[in-house]
Image (cartoon, rainbow, N blue to C red):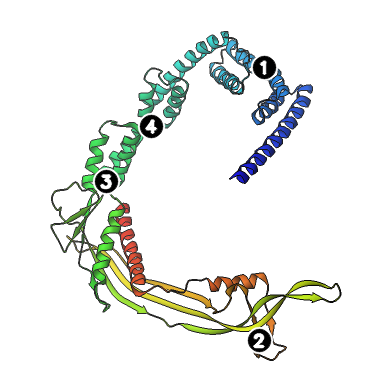
Amino acid sequence: MKKIFTVFIIFLSMLIVLGGCASKRYTKKATKLEAMGQYANAADLYYQAIVIKNTNVEAFAGLKRTGQMSLSKKLSEFNKSYNNQNNKEAVYLYEDARNYYNKISGVGIDLNFPTFYNEYYEEVKNIFLENQYYEGSTLLTEEKFAQAENVFKEIVRIQPNYKDSKDKLITATYEPKYRDGLQKMDIGKYRQAYYTFDDIIKGAGAYKSSYDLKAESLNKGTITITIEKIKNLSGTTNIETNLESKVITEIQSFNNPFIKIIDSNNQNRVASSQNNSNSIAATDLSLYCEISKFTYNKGTVETIEKKGYLRKKVKVLNRESEEYEYKNEYSKVKYNEYKMSRTLDMNFMYKLVDKRTGEIKATTSKQVLVRDDIHYAKYTGDNKNLVPGYWKYLILSSEEDYINDRSSEINKLNSLLTARSQIKDYNTLSIEAINETAGIISNGVNKFVNEN
């Protein structure tokens, strides 16, 4: 713990030293710019120097000088616009000057900001806002909503409580959306209308009849889907039950307010993301699913005998230096690599059918193939010193023998020695296949409801 604390102190000291050096560099550059009459740029550098090191006395003095010059120039420009009755420009120039003053005050330097400028600002601001309010109101009357929205946004930014500008901003922003929602309802696009009214409520609350229209859109846009009993033609028993349960769970997880699910196996149970209905509504669509293939390939282990070397460090005497040193010796060994693949192949089809007309609204056929592969190595001896390579004869040497002791090759072998050796079983692959299939079906149902 003491060692960690010491390292922290050293690191902190380095940061302080580096920060002090950077602060001095900024101050030096600022001094040169000030001498050249570039007061605004100099003030920016003095400011950065203080941010880095707030005890830089020279930077404080420099910012006090150049900051005041920069502020005085901004106020002079504001005063010029005020005298020329350029009210909009004057408002923006004053805001720029006030923001600059606040920025410099934030590092502890109090610049001179004469109070009479505040009085001038209030005068031009009131005239500007009055003109803006009249312009925005006119645009609103002419139903030029986007332009009116920009005008009232600016008014509210400058003075949030100016007359009824907030209300007019809400009208300018949400009236077009409100009308769009009504139009969507008129042409039967209730689900799109629902989300339009939902956006209005989130932004403007109870704007006109948005709550009632949202509820009406939900009621008229809801689709009731009966999950029909899944046909299992694969010869593998019980998978249809698992798939049906997973499909219902996946559809519910979307929390789509327009989907009500009825399980055909239990007409008294309604699974709904809304949970606000006490009776089963008339079915709009039926979901039919069929499993045509569910083939499990267990696979077999492939064993590959590999030849390598066991590395050992030995202490030997160097006859020239008469000193002991270490060198690597390699002995020939065998180890095994194992490979295995296991798959589960599933074919299925689903379709959404209009129960009243028998029309197929959507249909999809797909193959889902899940697999697991393992590749690992085993050695009964010292794994840490096992080195890949090849040898032809165990006792005799051969020109074909080689030791592959490059670190990259050793790392590959180590990865195989520590790799997973347990392959996924039937139950795991079966669950993965059913989950993937249920995901495809549920996504298809949710997409159909959202797009139609």
Query: Which of the image's four quarters has the N terminus?
Result: top right
Relative to 77, say whether 397 is above or below.
below
Task: Tell me if mark 1 has few (under 14), some (14-19) or many (20+) residues whose alpha carbon lies within 10 angstroms of its own.
Answer: many
The type of residue carrying mark 1 is Gln
Q: Which mark is residue 173?
A: 4
Relative to 15, say whether 319 is above or below.
below
Give the secondary structure at mark 3. helix
| Residue indicated by mark 3 | 190
**How many marks can you see?**
4
Q: Which of marks 1 and 4 is nearer the N terminus?
A: 1
Q: How far apart are marks 2 and 1 (CA)?
A: 84 Å
Q: Residue 67 placed where, x, y %?
A: 67, 20
Q: Which mark is residue 208?
A: none
Question: Which residue is found at the position 28% from the left and 77% from the top?
Answer: 234
Question: Which residue is found at the position 23% from the left and 48% from the top?
Answer: 274
Dividing the picture into quarters, in which one does residue 423 lie? bottom left
Q: How far apart are marks 2 and 3 (CA)?
A: 76 Å
The type of residue carrying mark 2 is Trp
Q: Do the residues labelled 2 and 1 touch (CB within 8 Å)?
A: no
The type of residue carrying mark 4 is Thr
Q: Earlier in the sequence, mark 3 or mark 4?
A: 4
Q: Are marks 3 and 4 in contact (CB under 8 Å)?
A: no
Q: Distance between the residues labelled 4 and 2?
A: 80 Å
Q: Nearer the viewer, residue 378 or 22?
A: 378
Q: Which of marks 4 and 2 is nearer the N terminus?
A: 4
Task: Tell me if mark 2 has few (under 14), some (14-19) or many (20+) residues whose alpha carbon lies within 10 angstroms of its own.
Answer: many
Q: Residue 408 placed where, x, y %?
A: 64, 70
| Residue indicated by mark 1 | 68
| Residue indicated by mark 2 | 391
Q: Do the residues labelled 4 and 2 touch (CB within 8 Å)?
A: no
Task: Tell me if mark 4 has few (under 14), some (14-19) or many (20+) residues whose alpha carbon lies within 10 angstroms of its own.
Answer: many
Q: Residue 111 placed where, x, y %?
A: 63, 15
